[in-house]
Amino acid sequence: MSVENAYRLLYGAALAWLTALAGIMLFRSVRSAGVTGRLLCVNMIGTLVNGVILILAELLRESWLMDVALIYTMISFVSVLILVRVAAPAEDRDTETAGEGGKADE
């Protein structure tokens, strides 16, 4: 077995593992009871997809896929921030602001 074939086998196993983990996270996000758990699962799926893109970039020797991964990371980060702001329970946000400079709405 050559080194090239060993790397292909390693990359294939890593891709299969990350895909399986993304499937588990998808199942977990559907089964989760709270909004926070679902948001964490969606964020983890985004991270796993980013890992798959980076492994494919190395496997296929396509450097432009690394740029795609970087853009995907930025979009994923901003979308999770927006989802947290919109979908997080209001009482969680009130306790955060209460500790910053005084009391929450009384």
Image (cartoon, rainbow, N blue to C red):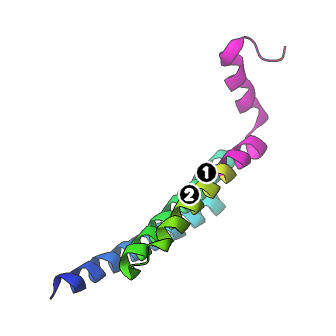
How far from the left and from the top, in percent, is residue 12? 35, 80
Looking at the image, which residue sits at the far bottom?
1
Q: Are marks 2 and 1 in contact (CB under 8 Å)?
A: yes
Q: Quadrant of the C terminus?
A: top right
Numbered mark located on residue 77 in the image:
1
Residue 81 visible to the viewer: yes
Residue 33 visible to the viewer: no
Q: Quadrant of the N terminus?
A: bottom left
Looking at the image, which residue sits at the far right?
106
How far from the left and from the top, in percent, is residue 79? 68, 53
How far from the left and from the top, in percent, is residue 65? 49, 72
Magenta-colored stretch includes residue 97: yes
Q: Secondary structure at mark 1?
A: helix
Left or right placement of residue 77 versus residue 52 in this view: right
Q: Residue at x 44, y 72 (%)?
A: 63
Magenta-colored stretch includes residue 34: no
Left or right placement of residue 26 versus residue 19 in this view: right
Magenta range is 80-104
Q: Nearer the viewer, residue 72 or 16?
A: 72
Mark 1: give few (<14), some (14-19) or many (20+) Cα within 10 Å: some
Q: Residue at x 43, y 74 (%)?
A: 57
Residue bearing mark 2:
73
Q: Nearer the viewer, residue 96 or 30?
A: 96
Q: Residue at x 76, y 46 (%)?
A: 87
Looking at the image, which residue sits at the far top?
102
